[in-house]
Image: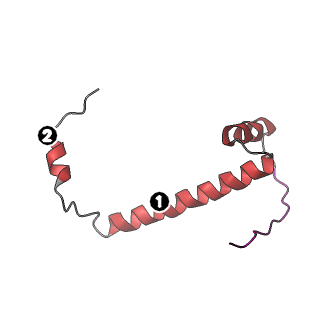
Amino acid sequence: MTTPSFTRKNLMVDPDDIRALARALGTASESEAVRIAIRDRLALEEAQAAFASIRARGGLDDVFSRSAARKGRRRAA
């Protein structure tokens, strides 16, 4: 694995939001929290593109017919 190279950016952000993000992620720095948030969002975008591609091809085949068995069942609350 290669060491990522970083570049300095000047961003206008709410400092309370950044602090809350860093606390939520348990990061040592606000910069690390922003890097994680960016990486996570890019992963989400990639996953959504993959799901859209699967839907465009007609979706998934339920080879075990599990969906049909669940249609008649009600979820327990």
- Pointer 2 residue: 72
Q: Earlier in the sequence, mark 2 or mark 1?
A: 1
* Mark 2 secondary-structure assignment: loop
Residue visible at 72% across and 55% down in the picture: 35
Residue visible at 13% across and 40% down in the picture: 72
Assess disc 2: are there few (<14), some (14-19) or many (≥20) residues with their C-alpha within 10 Å of its C-alpha. Answer: few
Numbered label attached to residue 48: 1
Q: Where does the image place residue 27, in percent across and percent down from the top left?
A: 74, 45
Residue 42, placed above or below residue 66: below
Q: Where does the image place residue 73, in percent across and percent down from the top left?
A: 17, 37
* Mark 1 secondary-structure assignment: helix
Q: Where does the image place residue 38, in percent across and percent down from the top left?
A: 67, 56
Residue visible at 35% across and 66% down in the picture: 54
> Looking at the image, which residue sits at the far bottom?
2
Amino acid type at image mark 2: Gly
**2 is within the stretch colored magenta:** yes
Residue 23, placed above or below residue 6: above
- Left or right: residue 17 versus residue 49 is right
- Left or right: residue 61 versus residue 26 is left
Q: Where does the image place residue 16, in percent across and percent down from the top left?
A: 77, 35
| Quarter where residue 3 is shown | bottom right
Q: Nearer the viewer, residue 44 or 5?
A: 5
Residue visible at 81% across and 39% down in the picture: 15
